[in-house]
Image (cartoon, rainbow, N blue to C red):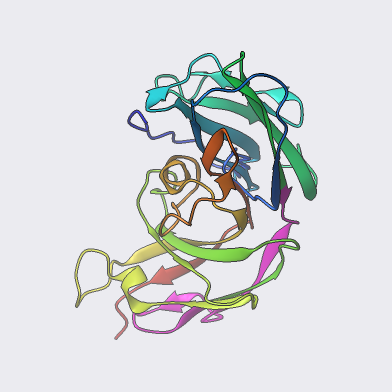
Amino acid sequence: MSALRIFKPGRGLLVIVTVAGILLACNGVIVGPTDGTVYHLLGLVAVDPNIAKTVAIAHVTQDTTVSTTSSVKFDGLTLSFNSAPFVGDSAYSATWNSAGQFAQGNHTLKISDSTTLPIQQITMGLPGSLSIIGVTPANRLSNGSDIVKLDWFGGTGASGFVIAAVRTGMEYTGVGYSIYATSMSTSATFPREAFYQTSPTTPDTGWYHLYVYAYTGAPDSAYTKVILPVGFPSQLADNVNLTKLKGHVGTVRLAAYDSVRVALLP
């Protein structure tokens, strides 16, 4: 995979639907001759209401060589190779200026490449909308060692949740802190190190944006660092295992962010 380039959208809500997002089930549809060639897929579908965009992105290789001739479609809509804003990233992508481009529920990703890769079909589930309904401390002021907790509502259909924190102005740059919620409960607490990124003894002061992600499948963690306000904490296990196609994909839907200020209190 070629080096990923940082894409910094403006303020707002970025709804990204990337071809590595929520994967509920997958079925291969073989419609022609096959050989020993194996393709590899990684990607994600993300919906981010903070910048009002939906993005789908997929990276496809034939054996170990980047495939530039594949047909990649999400719900029948074509993902273009090396299109803006991912020019030079050797990826297929599509961007929609809406967080409502795709409804909650199942969607279809289809990949093919002439006679070398007959149509491979993956069913991906997109979680329902979600929102942050509570922040602890309630006054949104922390000394860096106080418990900072998020409570949220929604995300129907998700297989898991991620919470993330990043100092304002640094969103979508590949920095920040994120962690998987340890259960399917709609509440999670940030560990102390989320606000001690540069020193183990002194907190990084300032305003932070706090996020909750609902995900399904195994979104590609490298692309989440490019597309989401904060990337995923680690890569989940591969979930695409068809005869001619391997890899991982998933979907992510974000809640609108909330905030907390970290300050050295007397």
Residue 54, quarter of the rendered image: top right
The quarter in which the C terminus is drawn is bottom left
Q: Is residue 135 or residue 228 the one in the foreground?
A: 228
Q: Is residue 79 magenta?
A: no
**Residue 60: percent from left, percent from top:** 49, 28
Q: With 161 as the anchor, is 204 left or right in this view?
A: left
**Residue 229: percent from left, percent from top:** 48, 49
Query: Is residue 34 something one can see in this rendering?
Result: yes
Q: With 57 as the anchor, is 127 left or right in this view?
A: right
Q: With 19 as the anchor, is 262 left or right in this view?
A: left
What residue do we see at 51% from left, 65% from top?
A: 163
**Residue 222: percent from left, percent from top:** 41, 44
What residue do we see at 34% from left, 70% from top?
A: 195
Query: Is residue 71 something one can see in this rendering?
Result: no
**Residue 221: percent from left, percent from top:** 44, 49
Q: Is residue 79 or residue 114 the one in the foreground?
A: 114
The quarter in which the N terminus is drawn is top left
User: Magenta part of the protein: which range?
Assistant: 125-149
